[in-house]
Image (spheres, rainbow, N blue to C red):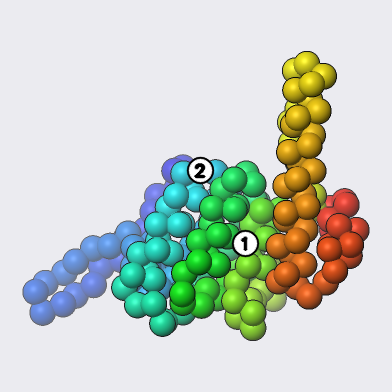
Amino acid sequence: MSEYTVPMVIETTLRGERAFDIYSRLLSERIVFLGSPLDDGVANVVTAQLLHLESEDDERDINLYVNSPGGSSAALLAIYDTMQTVSCDVATWCVGYAASAAAVILAGGTAGKRSALPHSSILIHQPHGQVGGQAVDIEIQAKEIIRQRRLIDEILSQHTGKTVAQISADTDRDF
């Protein structure tokens, strides 16, 4: 997102004109836009936005628009857990591309309020990891990747109505 100029929106009120960056303007309409790879910084921003919107009105829906190639499992789980914790419904929308961790966020929206625009793409697959080091370190890292895979398969199963076995088969390779 940093390589692009963020558009400004100018609003005219009785007190004059006021300029907002487009993301702030969307947030004022209860719209959160996830449009970059998931890392800790992105997770912190999205989590803060969800919590802020809940504190403003815990009954109105939050609309979360997703166009992301995915990213870290830790960032995914921070956003997902917040979505499940806030008392208001979170409607999710795929606009463009939701892959990997972003597809799980998309699935984590409130049942009946998950959508994909006509030309969007959604990709699910098992977690990836980079392992290295001594044999014992590789074994520890492999066990963690397997644990994360089971957790993500359970999350997807819970939100899709598919069995964990079906999710595991579907995520065995890019699907």
Give me the residue at 39% from left, 77% from top. 58
Residue behind mark 1: 105
Callout 1 secondary element: helix
In the image shown, does 84 or 108 lie closer to the viewer?
A: 84
Residue behind mark 2: 40
Give me the residue at 42% from left, 82% from top. 60
* Picture coordinates of residue 170, whole percent (x, y): 87, 60
Give the CA separation, mark 2 to mark 1: 15 Å
In the image shown, does 113 or 156 lie closer to the viewer?
A: 156
- Residue 16, image quadrant: bottom left
- Residue 120, image quadrant: bottom right
- The relative height of residue 149 versus residue 31 in the rendered view (above or below) is above
* Picture coordinates of residue 46, whole percent (x, y): 46, 57
Type of amino acid under label 1? Ile
Q: N-terminal of the two: label 2 or label 1?
A: 2
Taking the image as shown, residue 15 lies to the left or right of residue 164, namely left
- The relative height of residue 112 versus residue 83 in the rendered view (above or below) is below
* Quadrant of the snapshot with the C terminus: bottom right
* Picture coordinates of residue 97, whole percent (x, y): 66, 60
